[in-house]
Amino acid sequence: MFRIPSSNNGLYLGSVPESAAAKNGGTLITLDHDMVTLPGVGRTLTVAELAEHVDDMAGRLWAAGVRPSEHVAVHLSPGFDIYVLATAAARIGAVPVMLSPALEGESVAALLERLDRPHLLTDGTKLDGTLSAFPIGDLTDRVIVTTGSRPDAVTLAGLAGSPRQQPVMLHPDQPALMTHTSGTTGLPKLVVHSARSLRGRYRPQERLASLVRRRETVAIHVSYVHSRMYLALAVLLPRAMPLVIMNESAPAGVAELFAETQPGFIETHPNSFMEWEELVDHPRKPLASVRYFSSTFDAIHPSTMDRLLGASERRSPLFFQIYGQSECGPLVGRGYTRKNAHKADGRCLGFAMPGVTNFRLVSRNGARPSRETPGYIEVSTGGRALTYFGERERFDQQVHGSWWRGGDVGYRSRFGCLHLLDREVDVIPTIHSTLEVEDTLLGRLEELTELVVVAGPHQEPVPVVCTKDDRPLQAERWRSAVADLAPMAAPVQMPLTELPRTATMKIKRIELSQWLRTQEGPES
């Protein structure tokens, strides 16, 4: 059923901590939270200790009845425990299915049903909360709880001391990990990764890491259920880079953490970087030590890059913008400096990585793809996933030979840069690019903390705005800022915390648009 292939054929997540520990076991990992599953660990551990915990948990999962190639749905409260337990499942050849802590119970139940009775690895908080209204026992083969006990469930804590197991490595083209799409357009799709496709994702990320010439402390605030977390640690752990793994993104706590740990490299979601703009003027200078900023989930606004780079006191800091998708991993990218970030075109995502990724533009209407007539963006990469679990036909509709059509539209500049204008489902006919409008206005109005342009009740473009400290938006400043832009409805202001988001902090634009349609009408 399984064999141990050459490591060149695939990346085996379950062996990453052990391999890294053999090289650099003393490297420190700092957490901003306690792991509920491992309460005695505290907030600092070494790579060697991480490998020991993964091996321990793998033995417990085997004792609980988990076997190679079986699905283990991982749905836990946020914490580094998620990485430890998912990696432990992978170590014994099981297929971790990563379900975001932010998913509603209805979505979790629907995905469990699609998986056809998987093991469920969860905790009491989830069982008593979002999952309490659903027949979890009927939807799963067995429930494994990380803490406490539940009737008809296996208690992981009760399996301490279980015999350790040798790592199991499935064939490189068998399923090895499942993550889900962002869920911006309904029930998330389960993306199936293999060891070979994970190796394909590893290559561009390893190339980026090779640009970091000196040893830096790396701070990571990324969803624990996203493939990016597993690839980031696969690249960083063997390099002896001290890590800071973050649960929280609130600026006040981040300021204290960064002031203490002095990271030289930060990676997070674009929206978290926007939230951290207020750290620029913080008296403890929490961003002074940062040489590298990295954003890998969405395009980021140029004004955000400019402000963060300006807060660094390192010589020649860099901001890496990487464009990728759940189905394919990182695809194109480029770097920005203090000299060019402020004048960057926010729609320019960067360039393909020679020998690793490629992209092309395909006409939508018979016209040659250009800024005025954007085309479908199709990409080619060794990191493309195998399929959507239970939805192969849906996946195959986006496959065109060796090319993948991900649903974005854009064009290629004369310099070869890929420009993303919009998601196809977010296109508003009267607006050239909603993302371009957002870039422009966020650069003009410093009081804004977020701006999203979505379709209103009559398909009119409606700007939804959030301001610093929720202060009222000044009507005259708004009118001046939008005077040279395409007509839009009056802005709708709402608190930043009320914007619907995915696990990777993306705004759920369709959900926001649907909410607008239920209102009496936008207010200025």
Image (cartoon, rainbow, N blue to C red):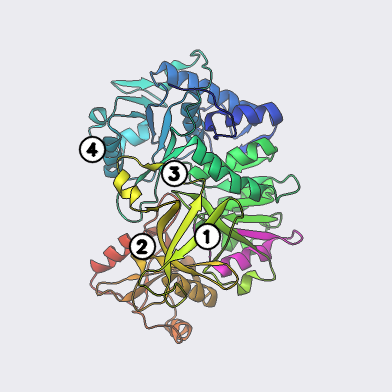
In the picture of the structure, the residue carrying the numbered disc 2 is 509
Under mark 3, the amino acid is Ala
Instruction: Give the alpha-carbon distance from disc 2 to disc 1, as whole Å.
Output: 19 Å
Q: For the residues carrying marks 2 and 3, which lies nearer the camera in this image? A: 3
Q: For the residues carrying marks 2 and 1, which lies nearer the camera in this image? A: 2
Q: Is residue 97 magenta?
A: no
Q: Which residues are magenta?
A: 298-320
Q: Is residue 37 visible?
A: no
Q: For the residues carrying marks 4 and 2, which lies nearer the camera in this image? A: 2
Who comes first in sequence, dot 4 or dot 2? 4
In the picture of the structure, the residue carrying the numbered disc 4 is 133
Residue 511: % across, % down: 31, 60
Kindly check if marks 4 and 3 are in contact, taking CB atoms under 8 A apart as contact: no
Kindly check if marks 1 and 4 are in contact, taking CB atoms under 8 A apart as contact: no
Tell me the quarter of the image containing the C terminus. Answer: bottom left
Residue 502: % across, % down: 40, 52
Q: Is residue 304 magenta?
A: yes
Who comes first in sequence, dot 4 or dot 3? 4
